[in-house]
Image (cartoon, rainbow, N blue to C red):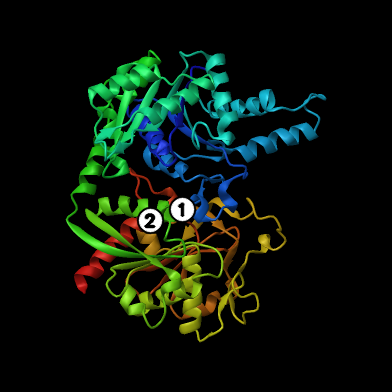
Amino acid sequence: MGKTKYIFVTGGVTSSLGKGIIAASLGKLLQARGYSVTIQKFDPYINIDPGTLNPYEHGECFVTDDGAETDLDLGHYERFLNIPTSQINNITTGRIYNNVIQRERAGDFLGKTVQVIPHITDEIKHNFYKLAQTELYDFVITEIGGCVGDIESLPFIEAVRQVRFELGTSNVVCIHLTLIPYLKAAGELKTKPTQHSVKELLEAGIQPDILVCRSEYPLNQEIRKKLALFCNVQINHVIESLDAETIYDVPLLMLKEKLDERVLNKFKMSLKGDPKMESWKEYLGRLKNPTSEIAIGLIGKYVELKDAYKSIAESFIHAGAVNECKVTITWIQSEDITEDNCEKLLGKLNGILVAPGFGERGIEGKITAVKYAREQMVPFFGICLGMQCAVVEFARNVLNMPDAGSTEINPGTAFPVIDIMEAQKNIKEMGGTMRLGAYDCTLKKGSKTHQVYGSSKIAERHRHRYEFNNKYLEQFEKHGMVASGVNNDTGLVEIIELTNHPWFIGTQFHPELKSTVLNPHPLFVKFVKAALTFQKNI
């Protein structure tokens, strides 16, 4: 573990306060001061990973280069720090218990009774330390999911207590994110929920070093003094976190509140001068001062929960800033789209993105949206299932294959233009068995996609079981839908595009998973640019 310092971020009062954004913002500030930082998330649910969870349950499943299906907060970590995460950046209760049970079955515990303490907490601590054992970091920030006081969080909180005891308070800082609600009838901010939340932590043996207080209104000195007194923290360690216009404001708001300084002072470490945030501020300047605005339709089946497409939404924010353009996403439920209402729902859009997904629900609406984009020359972007819908639509309406489909939806289709991958045919288990992670792709020179990337070799992240059926490739290319990106090892078609359309691209991979503030994904950047051009030419 060397000289690595450990920062733990816990939450209280309510969930969804933004622990991931606070962790990522602190990490960004420490990184901007010249320190090496990584962030990990420990989730208290019993699933091995979120890969089998419905997006309505948990938002999007974020996939890493090494093929881990992880919590969406890892997307925030990557977007803020601009460094990739991996399997060991996200651990669940299910994985912890699974590891311990496998060791018990192997006889590793020499006949001992396996218990939460020490065996489960030892496994949690082992995973706390794992990142610093693979690479030397100055800081490992660990976000503990859920709320303090939840039954499922107790083993993680106990493990944090043990780490503080083992490494000493000079090597561990605990940050507690909490809520200061405003009672409109009384006209005042209330500290009691935070006091009770800190009391829960104290009962578990943890004294928070820093309080980060989410609030709709500024905390006056009296409120800060009260929180400091009743929560046993220094008054300058009570940090205000007001609601922000954009999550990308939060690092600068935390800089203003001196969160990074408080952490470094607690560790008795050098500030190394002011953090270098010029490029971040430049990005925010472009983001907040657009010179144009476009409307992009996101066609999906989980649009009621926008976190289901979190990385796509953030990628549009990044790409919009590059183009000095505000991208307004129109969220359209694919089940609502029919041939009769297509023009009404899609007619005012400057671009159409058909989103990823699984299963039959809403599939015909997606195919109808693809047809509209193709025929009306609207810039189109299809991701994973969105690309597959584009293939099916083209087969039905251009290649004269009316029954064309995917065997995922219709196993008996006469024209299986999308079929299950050979390697997936004998797989029975659902979790962690798809084609996952980063794979190489070779781009066809002279294609639109080649121009977008400016390179013939790329690597992108995947999460799928079905693929383009190469038996039909010659027919597709003869009629103008070309495979502009292919995996050389397997022959898998990674990218399709239309030669007679201004911007019509579908990718089997998920480009949104690699877009960051400092490195916006080129496909999103050029898609937004194409939508701007389309808008001007209407």
Quadrant into which the C terminus falls? bottom left
Q: Position of residue 273 (x, y in %)?
A: 27, 20
Task: Tell me the residue that label 1 is attached to.
Answer: 458
Write the residue at 31% across / 52% down: 317
Q: Quarter-wise, where is residue 382 in the image?
A: bottom left
Disc 1 residue type?
Answer: Ile
Task: Tell me the residue that label 2 is attached to.
Answer: 453
Secondary structure of the residue carrying numbered label 2: helix
- The answer to which of 309 and 322 lies nearer the viewer is 309
- The answer to which of 114 and 350 lies nearer the viewer is 114
Can residue 111 be seen here? yes
Write the residue at 58% across / 34% down: 151
**Residue 368 left/right relative to 517:** right
**Residue 527 left/right relative to 401:** left
- The answer to which of 274 and 476 lies nearer the viewer is 274
Disc 2 residue type?
Answer: Tyr
Q: Within 10 Å of the Cα at label 1, are there few (<14), some (14-19), or many (20+) other Cα atoms? A: some
Q: Position of residue 400 (x, y in %)?
A: 51, 87
Quadrant into which the N terminus falls? top right
Circle on res. 407: none
Q: Within 10 Å of the Cα at label 2, are there few (<14), some (14-19), or many (20+) other Cα atoms? A: some
**Residue 194 left/right relative to 202:** left
Q: Position of residue 368 (x, y in %)?
A: 43, 77
